[in-house]
Image (cartoon, grey):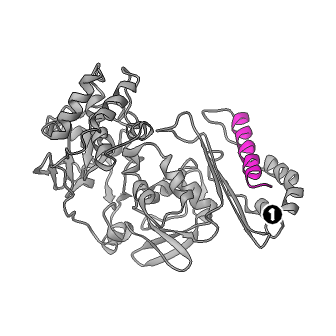
């Protein structure tokens, strides 16, 4: 593994790391810098015990490669403990006995800071959402929620050592040349890539700071999402349609949404990918480039099978092009084992566009049912060009065709369960849309 120099700010002080660029930030903080307040829990982004603040946003350090933090500011609990707001939170937590074993508390405190920094007066629901990626096995959360509410009463305190420096970045052209001439695995967020234990043995190309991949723009036909835009950035952007925002809000928890990207969500090839489902139901396209040119393909043509993708070793996903029409009248449901940090057991999205009494567009898509996202255009076309009354007359035939076509794969839940959920969601969509 080739070592590299990574310059970053750690608790306000400039540092240079010269080791393996794909090493976990968690391991480097605990091993090389002896900052053991950052706890090692699941190493999969599930527990939040290893939470740190990177460039003013909460991140799971177990999912952060050292090569991705060049030029970044990293704050651990040790650095944060010198701030005024830590004192406020410390007193608030103590006042309601919100700390028992203490293992989760460093991450929980940093999650509290990131919440209060952006939302100084959160509601109880917003507090629970803000700490939804941080698990606690002792307190049952109620006392922690109460403590954050108490701390929110002091809005004058601020974290004054976390700043976002000017990060060095390569151009898209440089990245494509590297992609052509070297065997590097591209990544942006790392939320999926960093989970396997052998991830540190491979060579990676970090593309998360490439300016051309961080833009959300529009033209006459499309909303154009740069592949390295994070879920948080998509949620906060004015051009993002509400359907996509709703799906992104239900992805994992804040720390994951701050790192994970729409391009990565598509590029990992999973039928459970939440944002990919929305791009599929909207018949979006991918702009894919290599050093010699580009091509634009429908997203449905990108998935060839289980983890089999229509992309070559020298190419990068650059943009996702979402058509600007037919985005307002939608239905979205994600079925999982819990509200946060949940991988879909089944997910569904549907859109309907009626103009002058005629159905101009009708589209449905299912995730986490078979090896690829389901988009049966040939069935959905039954309703296009029909009036709503005509569509109602075809409803039974339409459902029967879907019932015959959908054959779920085996998984953590039974085939029968997943099939019933699919048909119930589809029928509910039709009912909500008055078909």
In the displayed structure, 69 sits above or below 357; it is: above
Please state which of residues 349 and 235 is positioned toward the viewer in this rendering: 235
Q: Is residue 364 above or below residue 47?
A: below
Residue at 63% of width from left, 60% of height from top? 281
Q: Position of residue 264 (x, y in %)?
A: 44, 56
Task: Examine the rendering and report whether any part of residue 405 can be seen.
Answer: yes
Principal secondary structure, stretch drawn in magenta: helix
Tell me the quadrant of the picture where the C terminus can be found. Answer: bottom right
Residue 71 in the figure: left or right of residue 325: left
- 387 or 230: nearer the eye? 387
Q: Is residue 385 left or right of residue 74?
A: right
Q: Nearer the viewer, residue 50 or 362?
A: 362
- Percent x, y of residue 417: 70, 34
Point 78% across, 59% down: residue = 379
Vertical side of 250 occupied by 319: above or below: below
Q: Nearer the viewer, residue 245 or 157?
A: 157
User: Horizontal placement of 434 versus 186: left or right?
Assistant: right
The residue wearing badge 1 is 383
Q: Which residues are magenta?
A: 415-435
Taking the magenta stretch, the answer to whether it contains residue 41 is no
Q: Is residue 39 above or below residue 56?
A: above
From the top left corner, tell me how far across and down residue 392 is, in percent. Answer: 86, 56
- Badge 1 marks a residue whose secondary structure is loop
Identified at 38% across, 30% down, the residue is 135
Image quarter for residue 352?
bottom right
In-image side of 9 versus 277 (left or right): left
Name the spot of residue 138 as percent of width and height, x first.
36, 20
Residue 59 in view here: no
């Amino acid at each position: 593994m080739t070592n590299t120099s990574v310059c970053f700010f750690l608790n306000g002080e400039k540092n240079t790391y010269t080791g393996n660029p794909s090493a976990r930030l968690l391991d480097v903080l605990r091993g090389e810098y002896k900052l053991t307040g950052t706890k090692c829990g699941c190493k999969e982004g599930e527990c939040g015990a290893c939470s740190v603040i990177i460039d003013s946003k909460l991140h799971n350090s177990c999912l952060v490669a050292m090569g991705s933090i060049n030029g970044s500011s990293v704050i651990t609990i040790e650095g944060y403990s010198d701030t005024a707001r830590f004192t406020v939170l410390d007193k608030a937590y103590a006042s309601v006995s919100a700390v028992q074993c203490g293992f989760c508390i460093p991450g929980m405190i940093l999650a509290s800071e990131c919440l209060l920094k952006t939302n100084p007066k959160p509601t109880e629901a917003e507090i629970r959402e803000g700490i939804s990626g941080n698990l606690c096995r002792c307190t049952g959360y109620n006392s922690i929620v109460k403590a954050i509410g108490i701390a929110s009463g002091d809005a004058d305190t601020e974290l004054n050592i976390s700043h976002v420096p000017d990060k060095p970045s390569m151009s898209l052209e440089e990245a494509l040349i590297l992609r052509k001439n070297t065997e590097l695995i591209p990544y942006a967020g790392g939320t999926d890539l960093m989970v396997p234990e052998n991830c540190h043995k491979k060579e990676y190309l970090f593309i998360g700071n490439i300016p051309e991949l961080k833009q959300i723009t529009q033209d006459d036909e499309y909303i154009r999402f740069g592949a390295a835009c994070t879920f948080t950035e998509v949620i906060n952007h004015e051009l993002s349609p509400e359907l996509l925002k709703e799906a992104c809000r239900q992805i994992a928890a804040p720390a994951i949404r701050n790192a994970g990207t729409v391009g990565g969500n598509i590029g990992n090839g999973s039928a459970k990918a939440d944002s990919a489902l929305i791009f599929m139901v909207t018949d979006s396209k991918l702009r894919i480039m290599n050093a010699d040119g580009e091509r634009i393909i429908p997203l449905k043509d990108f998935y060839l099978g289980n983890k089999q993708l229509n992309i070559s070793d020298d190419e990068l996903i650059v943009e996702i092009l979402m058509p600007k029409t037919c985005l307002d009248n939608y239905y979205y449901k994600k079925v999982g084992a819990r509200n946060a940090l949940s991988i879909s057991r089944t997910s569904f999205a549907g859109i309907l566009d009626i103009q002058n009494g005629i159905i101009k567009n009708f589209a449905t898509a299912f995730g986490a049912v078979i090896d690829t996202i389901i988009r049966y255009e040939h069935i959905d076309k039954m309703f296009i060009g029909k009036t709503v009354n005509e569509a109602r007359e075809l409803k039974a035939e339409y459902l029967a065709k879907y019932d015959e076509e959908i054959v779920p794969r085996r998984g953590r839940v039974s085939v029968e369960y997943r099939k019933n959920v699919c048909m119930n969601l589809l029928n509910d969509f039709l009912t909500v849309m008055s078909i």
